[in-house]
Image (cartoon, rainbow, N blue to C red):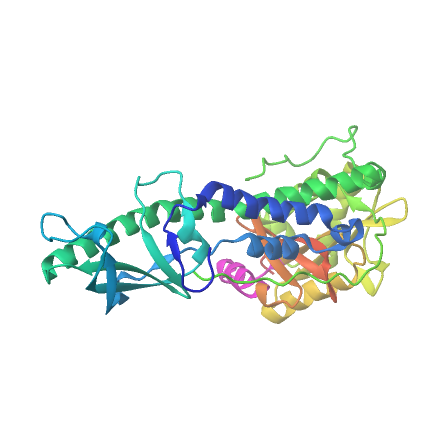
Amino acid sequence: MRQGYGKTRIFSERELRDYLEQKKSSITDYIDSESDDYLLNVNEKDYIQHKSSEAYVEPLEIHQDKIYASSSEQMIPAEYFPSQLFNVQPGKSYKKDVIKFHVPFTGNAELLGCIPCSRLMWTMDVELSNQEFCFEIINFSDDVESITREKDTNMSSIMQQLDNVSIEVERYNASIEAKVKQAFEGRKNRILAKSDVLASLGVPIKKTGSVSPTFSVPTPQTRKKIFVRKPVVQEIGYTPEPTLDKTAYLDILKLIHDVGKEFERLPSLYAGKEEEHLRDHFLMMLEPNFQGSATGETFNNNGKTDILLRHEGTNVFIAECKFWRGKKVFLDTISQLLGYLTWRDSKAAVIMFVPNKDFTSALETAKQVISEHQNYLEFINFSDETWLNYMFHLNDDRNRQVQIAIMLYHIPR
């Protein structure tokens, strides 16, 4: 689009789909140009938000209610005059009053030159400057109604074309985050595959086939532009670290959830039990059902944790069991759990036993206050009404993410 005042043909300079595709391609090209170490270390959510904000196209808004007019005398060539009204000589120019309509707009000025896929077969010359464009109507015969009618016709066409542009831009903006995520994950997976990290570091915690499960395994239930700064990665190089397979993690959580629901179904058997006694019921089910070892009260990093699964000497799953004692204890339990973890892509759980008569109140409090934790990143999903999944980060490093299942069970004391 031309800088300063200059004539341009509105909505007719370039195909809008080409403009949007170029924006999208520049982002994916940039992701491909990032260093391997940076992409392997960076917080995925923060990076995707940053690149999505760069690719976002601010919608164009034309403010019809703020149109104003100015006038000036100009020399108009004879060929512009209506021949039926004026006797003018070809090749000469005549002085006439020209009404200029100033139309303010906000948003992406480049969209004024873009041709939408669905379009009016119409365009007109405008003058473009900072945050407004102008079109002129020659006052040939001091006919106010005629001038107003021509202005309204022009604006009607402009607004119809704007609607077509806006629909296309809205569709693009709605899809850009998924496109960035796809590009990020594709590049990251190529890097990992290249170094064979995926194959060598997936921790094979598998269910033991010889043990019949005591509990059944349930089926899982499945404006203005804001600039997001590029995430900073402090680490140099990428150190491969163990990861617990997502399917194994889900199987572990399902088993814990089944045991927790059993507590609720048989309250007389479990009422009055202490945390360690309830914890032992989880351990009795985890130990025979998974290859690896499950131990209680095992020291790990900054302290001891209630449930710890290890594979070949490496901690692959950690859970904390606590009685619900309100907001502070709940948030402190999350902090305690995070203090035990040291590697990226950690997986963990917080198991809360709620003795309160009003279980719903405790559940709602947990949902409301969890985002107040300083390491909170985002809510992932519900696996059940009392089993919620969240993403946190390790202390002082947003790029090392931790998936934590928050699981609450009603255990009257």
Q: Please tell me in which quadrant of the rendered image residue 392 appears.
A: bottom right
Confirm whether the magenta stretch covers residue 362.
yes
| Front residue of this view, candidates 35 and 370 | 35
Q: Quadrant of the C terminus?
A: bottom right
Give the magenta-colored segment's residue range.
Answer: 353-370
Q: Is residue 306 visible?
A: yes
Q: Residue furthest right?
A: 313
Q: How many marks?
A: 0
Q: Residue furthest top?
A: 210
Residue 6 drawn at (x, y percent): 40, 60
Residue visible at 22% across and 64% down in the picture: 99
Residue 245 drawn at (x, y percent): 75, 40
Q: Please tell me in which quadrant of the rendered image residue 259 appears.
A: top right
Residue 385 drawn at (x, y percent): 52, 49
Q: Is residue 262 visible?
A: no
Q: Please tell me in which quadrant of the rendered image residue 300 appears.
A: bottom right
Residue 21 drawn at (x, y percent): 54, 42
User: Is 271 left or right of 39, judged from the image as shown?
Assistant: left
User: Is 169 left or right of 182, judged from the image as shown?
Assistant: left
Judged by its main secondary structure, the magenta piece is helix
In the image, residue 220 sits, relative to residue 26, either above or below, namely above
Residue visible at 70% across and 33% down in the picture: 213
| Front residue of this view, candidates 159 and 169 | 159
Confirm whether the magenta stretch covers residue 285.
no
User: Is 297 left or right of 398, judged from the image as shown?
Assistant: right
